Amino acid sequence: MKTFKNVCIVSLILVIVSCSNDNEQVMPPVGNDTEQVIPSVGNDNEQVVPPGNLAPPFAGTIFLDPDIITDSDKTTFVRLSYAGQATRTMFDRRVDDWITVTPFLFNSTYDDDLSIEIQVNPEFQNSDAAEIEALKFAEVIGRLPTALRIDVETVWIHKGTEPFGGGNNNLLIHTGQATLYEIDGILEETFVHEASHTSLDAKHATSSGWVAAQVSDGNFISTYASDNPSGEDISESFLLYMAIRYRSDRINQSLKDKILETIPNRIMYFDGQNFNMYPIE
């Protein structure tokens, strides 16, 4: 089972991922903001702020329990095949912009008939080195439920210690940051958060049912969600929904009580979506 390391590492990661702005799905981050949603082109989503002034119980949710998904859990990953190199446009947080390169390409397939093209930055020098990275993350991503992988078409892998990202039918990975997440035991939990951006936000984040649940709950599960109600609330809430409904034996009673007390209507909303949670359930 994974275990938490020291508070310094947790604090470092919290600082890295807890900043955002209100236009995170529209354009690249501005200034010092480090958004988790990969920038894309589109229209601004109206920020919906529920009434109430209750303080969220947590700063962010990926740090709360490292055992919601572990490296011993089943993966749907089946195989990885090398597809050569070709021109692709990828977002790289180190330059805070889009780059056009010729990454090493791998086709990753899963036993629920989903597939992902994994694009590994050519800075990894050769296909063998790139394959090590692609294989590692393909297996981890395979532990996410089908509902979170359904819209993931590509994965970008770069070096560097920068926040992961979700959106644009993609998952963004920086391997230095991945090491920090692994040290703290929250690599899988972070992927749940980011894949929620990719596969859930577009349909649910500003839907009437979700907004009604926000208003009925009158609070947010985290400060990060409260600061970004239409950009981070789904991702911050879905991980703990998984914990309550599918991993309740892995979290302590205090955490269970706090989740149920804070976001009961959001949990009911998720219950009503009939998500395909394989291989979690």
Image: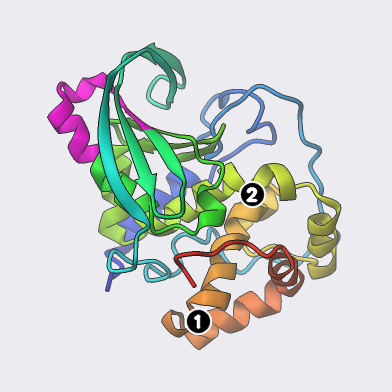
The image position of residue 106, as x and y in percent, is 30, 31
Quadrant holding the N terminus: bottom left
Magenta-drawn segment: 118-133
| Quarter of the figure with residue 259 | bottom right
Where disc 1 sits, the SS reads helix
Q: Residues within 10 Å of mark 2 (few under 14, many from 20)?
A: many
Q: Is residue 237 left or right of residue 123?
A: right
Residue designated by label 2: 200
The image position of residue 39, as x and y in percent, is 57, 27
Q: Is residue 127 magenta?
A: yes
Which residue appears at 62% of the width and 57% of the height?
A: 223
Q: Could you tell me the amino acid type at mark 1?
A: Ser
Residue designated by label 1: 248
Which residue appears at 64% of the width and 65% of the height?
A: 221
How many numbered marks appear?
Answer: 2
Q: Is residue 161 left or right of residue 279?
A: left
Q: Could you tell me the amino acid type at mark 2?
A: Leu
Question: Is 196 placed above or below 63 here?
Answer: above
Main secondary structure found in the magenta portion: helix
Q: Say if mark 2 contacts mark 1, CB within 8 Å.
A: no
Residue 220 visible, this orientation: yes
Q: Is residue 25 left or right of residue 251?
A: right
Question: Is 275 placed above or below 154 here?
Answer: below
Q: Residues within 10 Å of mark 1 (few under 14, many from 20)?
A: some
